[in-house]
Image: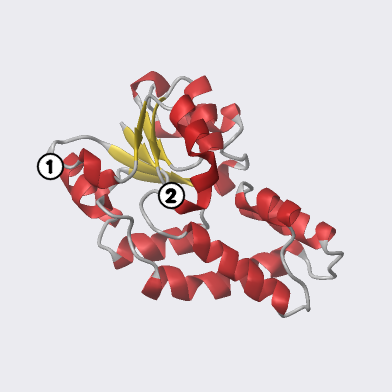
């Protein structure tokens, strides 16, 4: 089974979240710090919201922070953000070859669904699994163990396509095959991504026959 990350792998949406963070904080007279950006970029929503509240000493409840993020992001996912180059063609090719596919994402469910429906990709996947619903971050090996259980799949028979060096390293440790996909958000960590993945591609276009 092929497992695809969403943000930065299928959709060009990683940098979108930098803008959401800036807009959210600007409304409060604040700006992102390097520590803030590092933590929230690799955390599932509830953890990121709690960290934001604590880091900036906000009075907002984590649930309210998440709701505001959702409202800011939905327009981008539903109307603006593009697919990564080659994504549609490669997914179509995999479907034609009969390869079972699933999405495994830290994205919010409503935002993920909006993007997949916008591009007509929802029916390509046998399942969409959200790290948020598992309750673990994708850099936790136990998250992939639970993913395999939910999919009824042997992790040794799964290949993960992901742009995050952390996610790919964790997946490899959990026994998955890994393909690293370049995204500008992690441009400074590409050698690390190459090192932890069996294969590395600058674009999914390289995989289209």
Q: Earlier in the sequence, mark 2 or mark 1?
A: 1
User: Would residue 8 be found to the left or right of residue 1 on screen?
Assistant: right
**In which quarter of the view is residue 120 placed?**
bottom left
Q: Is residue 131 above or below residue 176?
A: below
Q: Residue at x 56, y 33 (%)?
A: 143
**Residue 106 seen from this side:** no
The secondary element bearing badge 1 is classed as helix
Q: Nearer the viewer, mark 2 or mark 1?
A: 2
User: Would residue 102 be found to the left or right of residue 56 on screen?
Assistant: left
Location of the C terminus by quadrant is: top left
Location of the N terminus by quadrant is: top left
User: Would residue 155 be found to the left or right of residue 73 on screen?
Assistant: left
Separation of residues labelled 2 and 1 (CA atoms)? 26 Å
The one nearer the camera, 50 or 38, is 38
Image coordinates of residue 159 in percent, x first then y, are 35, 29
Q: Residue at x 34, y 43 (%)?
A: 202
Label 2, on which residue?
A: 183
Q: Residue at x 50, y 41 (%)?
A: 164
Q: Residues within 10 Å of mark 1 (few under 14, many from 20)?
A: few
**In which quarter of the view is residue 139 placed?**
top right
Label 1, on which residue?
A: 96
User: Would residue 142 be found to the left or right of residue 24 on screen?
Assistant: left
Q: In the drawing, what numbered circle is on residue 71?
A: none
Q: Residues within 10 Å of mark 2 (few under 14, many from 20)?
A: many
Image coordinates of residue 144 in percent, x first then y, are 51, 30
Applied colour scheme: secondary structure
The secondary element bearing badge 2 is classed as loop
Image coordinates of residue 92 in percent, x first then y, are 18, 48
Image coordinates of residue 43 in percent, x first then y, are 64, 48
Q: Is residue 27 above or below residue 40?
A: below
**In which quarter of the view is residue 26 placed?**
bottom right
């Amino acid at each position: 089974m092929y497992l695809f990350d969403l943000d930065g792998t299928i959709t060009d949406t990683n940098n979108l979240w930098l803008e959401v963070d800036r807009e959210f904080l600007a409304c409060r007279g604040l700006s992102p710090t390097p520590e803030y950006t590092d933590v929230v970029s690799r955390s599932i929503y509830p953890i990121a919201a709690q960290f934001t509240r604590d880091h900036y000493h906000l009075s907002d409840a984590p649930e309210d922070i998440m709701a505001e993020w959702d409202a800011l992001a939905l327009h981008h996912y539903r109307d603006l953000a593009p697919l990564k180059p080659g994504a549609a063609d490669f997914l179509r090719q995999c479907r034609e070859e009969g390869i079972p596919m699933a999405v495994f994402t830290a994205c919010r469910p409503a935002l993920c669904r909006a993007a997949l429906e916008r591009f007509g990709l929802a029916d390509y996947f046998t399942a969409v699994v959200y790290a948020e619903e598992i309750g673990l971050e994708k850099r936790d090996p136990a998250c992939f163990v639970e993913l395999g259980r939910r999919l009824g799949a042997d992790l040794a028979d799964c290949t993960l396509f992901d742009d995050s060096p952390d996610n790919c390293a964790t997946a490899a440790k959990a026994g998955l095959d890994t393909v690293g996909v370049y995204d500008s958000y992690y441009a400074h960590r590409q050698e690390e991504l190459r090192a932890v993945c069996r294969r590395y591609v600058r674009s999914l276009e390289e995989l289209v026959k």
